[in-house]
Amino acid sequence: METITIKDIARALNLSTSTVSRALRNSYEINNETKKLVLEYAEKMNYRPNPIALSLRDSKSKSIGVIIPEIANNFFSQLINGIESIAYNMGYHVVIFQSHESYEREVANTNYLVSRKVDGLLVSLSSLTRDLTHFEELLDKGMPIVFIDRVPKNIDTHKIVVDNFFGSYQATEHLIKTGRRRIAHLTSPFYLSITMERLAGYRQALEDNGIPFDESYVKYCHHGGMMLTENETAVQELLNLPEPPDAIFTASDRLTTSCMSVLIQKNVKIPEEMALVGFTNTSVAELFNPPLTTVVQPAIDMGHQATELLIRLIEHPKKPTIFETRSLQTSLIIRDSTVEKSVNA
Amino acid sequence: METITIKDIARALNLSTSTVSRALRNSYEINNETKKLVLEYAEKMNYRPNPIALSLRDSKSKSIGVIIPEIANNFFSQLINGIESIAYNMGYHVVIFQSHESYEREVANTNYLVSRKVDGLLVSLSSLTRDLTHFEELLDKGMPIVFIDRVPKNIDTHKIVVDNFFGSYQATEHLIKTGRRRIAHLTSPFYLSITMERLAGYRQALEDNGIPFDESYVKYCHHGGMMLTENETAVQELLNLPEPPDAIFTASDRLTTSCMSVLIQKNVKIPEEMALVGFTNTSVAELFNPPLTTVVQPAIDMGHQATELLIRLIEHPKKPTIFETRSLQTSLIIRDSTVEKSVNA
DNA sequence: GTGAAAGCGCTAACAA
DNA sequence: TTGTTAGCGCTTTCAC
């Protein structure tokens, strides 16, 4: 029942370790008899190669590291499922780390994964990450990295994103079409790629519909939704405006739920007094009161594509000159939280 | 910028690798001068020990493996956060694997983690796991394992659970007190520990209140909620009964949300026609329509305690004769989905 | 067709 | 106080 090694097999069969090793890898130079002998014995003793030894030797591990802000979020957990399914099929293992939206933890996780010799990295940036040297250095050393969703602008590698501009445009336009004019936007720190793109889409939709962009209707939550009080303050500030909004478009999962929570607490009627659209993959939007209109990201597909690109990078290290940035489409799922504003409202 | 090893330091400083190794570990036998020299150089060159080499040598890895059914579930993601925070402080890394409620994947994950030389395992059983030999063998070999929440009855090791009986009793009693008499129970496969305990609490509460237990009001979902059609069929069967229930008590996260979803779809009024209580840690129960009464598990604390026990087991391998089973309390959070049945209903 | 030996990075028993 | 050596499990030259 103890772990068995090549050495054990060699000893038992009176062969050298190299012969056993070759036999196990089905090398052409080994006699069929010997091969059969080894294979059968290995099978019988339930031999499993020691991946640690292989990693040490080859400096690779058949595993990929994933660094994401947090797991307790439907978008990211779906993303992980997408990643896992491809990785699993390609014979890679997946090691997941959460940055908890902290720059320091993102760096620490990165270093650890590298020292664990992961063959590549899949990353979605923490909302507090502004310095990207930890990734730039790795890329320089030849470590394959693919960024997902929250991607750095100035790093040249594969990226999988969604068309945030359009998703945002569509959501905002939907609010306008259902009769809202004072549309607020609750979002992440401005320097994140997703923030800027979503803000741009929101703004464009307003302007295309003759509504002037008003900076006081935009609230940035520095912690990306992780700090509840911050979210609540932001919503409260919107409610306190001389002309409070009649709709809020929230840019992330956490922001969406805590915004809704504050509105309910303050007895703000949704959608009559305040319409709500959220960028979120929550699986229970239809159970909400009212059912929530959402902009959904194709998280599983994003995971698939990112993982495919990463593994391709890993297995064909001949540097490709062109890196792709694939942009997938979001879908707007319309529910009751944005029902047409009635004439008497 | 390349990875630097002890050998490199030794060469640069004209020392032997063992001296460097000792200096780095601050061994008493090394001259202070030399130590300082080595430490400074190592710092300057940003030396990091190679954990792979250490694992190979010591057959341990300062990491613990976690095997859970799925990540996209608030209970488990909170559990992970609890696990991570303790592990992190104690210098351990956490490697997470999902069984997706599949026995085969649970076994595969177990084997992989073992071959990766994790120092211990934290496990919550998949709903399809009936054969436990993969864990029994490991335990025999001396691998520390702590089970959480879904624990095996016949394996002797530390376990962290909640008082499912009481949590369930309390929920059922609450339904009775708010005027329900025909209380159904939607639950996981009967052989899981949590299923049996929750069922027993439910049953006891009924009997203590003079309501006869009726087997036709209990529905088992073999896939623990992962198969949507199965959940829907179960709910539908309850609705089709000659005397359909006036309340449903659901035993897990997934079962709760899909049950609610079916009820809404079928236009069953909650709580007037059907009250609902769910065993779930969803963070958005208050946003539901109506806000959902829940039985909440102290997931983070469970993660803390399990990890503490596991690390104690890892670091003090002198077999303790007595293994603990710690039972934590759930809390019943009462919301509108179980509002008192009005007299005219 | 098979074996001996070296090396991946590190530590520890043993020598000096 | 420091160095030499062997070994963790595996593969791969290089010999035979």
Image (cartoon, coloured by chain):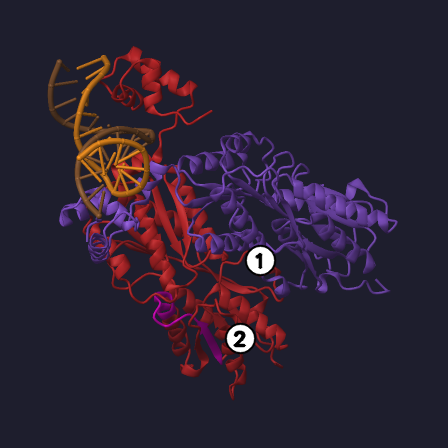
Chain colours: A red, B purple, C orange, D brown
Q: Quadrant of residue B62?
A: top left
Secondary structure found at label 1: loop
2 and 1 marks in contact (CB < 8 Å): no
Residue A335 coordinates in the image, percent (x, y)? 57, 64
Residue located at (35% from left, 35% from top): A51
Q: Mark 1 packing: few (<14 Cα in 10 Å), some, or many (20+)?
A: some
In the drawing, does residue B321 fall left or right of residue A243?
right
Which residue occupies the foreground of this view, A200 or B116? B116
Residue located at (55% from left, 48% from top): B306
In the drawing, does residue A291 fall left or right of residue A132?
right
First along the sequence among labels 2 and 1: 2
Q: Which residue is mark 1?
A: A284
Write down the chain letter for disc 1. Answer: A
Q: Mark 2 packing: few (<14 Cα in 10 Å), some, or many (20+)?
A: many
Which residue occupies the foreground of this view, C12 or B5? C12
Q: Which mark is residue A232?
A: 2
Name the kind of residue labelled 1 in the image.
Val
Magenta-highlighted residues: A182-197
